[in-house]
Image (cartoon, rainbow, N blue to C red):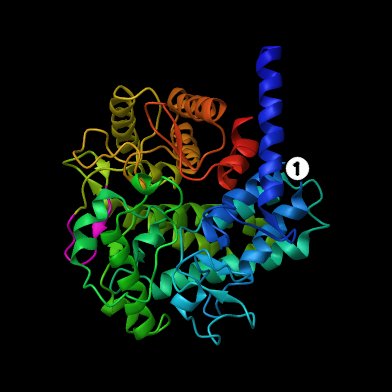
Amino acid sequence: MSEQNSNSHKTLRDEALYILKTNSRDHRYTVPSDRLYPYQWNWDSGFIALGYAAYDIDRALTELDSLMDGQWQNGMVPHIVFHEFEEHYAPGPLDWQVPSHLTAKPGVCTSGITQPPIIGTVLARIYASCPDKEAYHLRFATLYTHVKAYHEWFMTKRTSAPAHDLVKSLHPWESGMDNLPCWDKLVDDVPRGDISQFRRKDLKGDNAAQRPHDSDYHAYMSLVYHYRAIGYDSIELLPQAHFKVYDLVLNSLLLRSAHDMAQLAQDIKPEDQAYWQAQIHTLTQGMQKLWSEEHQAFLNQNAFDGQFLMPLSCASFLPLFARAANETQAAALAKLYTKWREIYPYSVPTTDPESPKFEIERYWRGPIWVNTNWMISEGFAAYGYQDIADTIKADTRALIEEHGFYEYFTPEGAKGLGANHFSWSAALALYWLF
């Protein structure tokens, strides 16, 4: 590395550290963005903890501890923990109205759905990098117990007989990839309820063209109010859900977490090995149902009728991160990546760039995200495609060097989009890029 590049990377590391410090609250949790997202998000905090672990193990574990303050008694980890009330964000705790008896810690308000379970993978990585495991043993053991309970919730509450092999997402927000084009028909079919009490607060400045449409939000909030009426923990929730998909993100990250928790259990709780190996087998077998021979890719699937959901998205690559693909499938995904990379100079776009539904600036319908790039790069490296992994890493680094720590980026490299000084972009830069 040249001296100029080394100095540039040092400057970017300093900026990333500053962003995490600025977005930290009470030295316990980190908001994704001071401007758009003033609470603690589930998978955001996982990625953020990896960034902290690069220089402060204690703060990394505290990030996860604070997320677990919102864990429910049934094991579910909600997608938002409302540590404080913020009037400039919606939907807030008054929209969700989660009954207080559901949360394990009194007085903590949360949302009523979950998000992709990256935290098991994160916990195992923090453990592996910890120079004094004995000093933190109790904290690791406690967090291990929380994550195992989270897995048990997924496998009991979000799977169905007879197979119980794949988990279902009940809301586009649960996938983390809110407005993927493959959700469009399902979102259109959601019965619209009365949401006159709700007002969007995510359209700040001139970013309306980068955010989901009002029609999408009508469906999102209709789902929230429908699930609230049923009861978020009711046995009727899964049968009566108006949105139900076998989501690649949830299932891939749950499977990868099971692999990593099995590794962690060797030191923390060896007697759990059979539990984790059984879950790994179950989820790996289930993931093969999401492989489309016709499209030579993994696809999200409509859980109502079993139909694959088009178009392809960057989630199609995540089974590599989960170690769920076979070698033939990995080779097909490498060809797909190469095809996409020939269209735009930066990778990996959220949506198939050849799809008529591709939108270069709108949220999860086209732009590049640092977190998905990290997982996809790791996945390709694990299957021996180091050249692809290195290209994705170089593309991500170049976009940050050019534009800064934005929430997402256009794949032609023209601009950063969404929130600037975005926490997981800064954190993953510390962990992965610089």
Above or below 126: residue 340: above
Quarter of the image where one finds residue 385? top left
Look at the picture and state if 207 lies above or below 226: above
> Which of 347 and 277 lies nearest the eye of the viewer?
347
Along the viewing direction, whichever of 153 and 199 lies nearer the viewer: 199
Where is residue 20? Give x, y as percent. 67, 47
Q: For residue 379, say whether it is visible.
A: yes
Relative height, residue 362 to residue 308 (above, below): above
Where, quadrant-wise, is the C terminus in this rendering?
A: top right
Q: Give the range drawn in magenta.
A: 299-307
Magenta stretch, main secondary structure class: loop
Q: Where is residue 377 in the image (x, y as percent from the top left)?
A: 47, 34
Q: In this view, does 234 lie above or below 399?
A: below
Q: Quadrant of the N terminus?
A: top right
Q: Which residue is drawn at 30% across and 55% down?
A: 213
User: What residue is shown at x 32% (from left), y 75% (from top)?
Assistant: 196
Residue 128 in view? no
**Picture quadrant of residue 330:** top left
Q: Which residue is drawn at 44% across and 61% down?
A: 201
302 is within the stretch colored magenta: yes
Query: What's the residue type where badge 1 is placed?
Result: Tyr
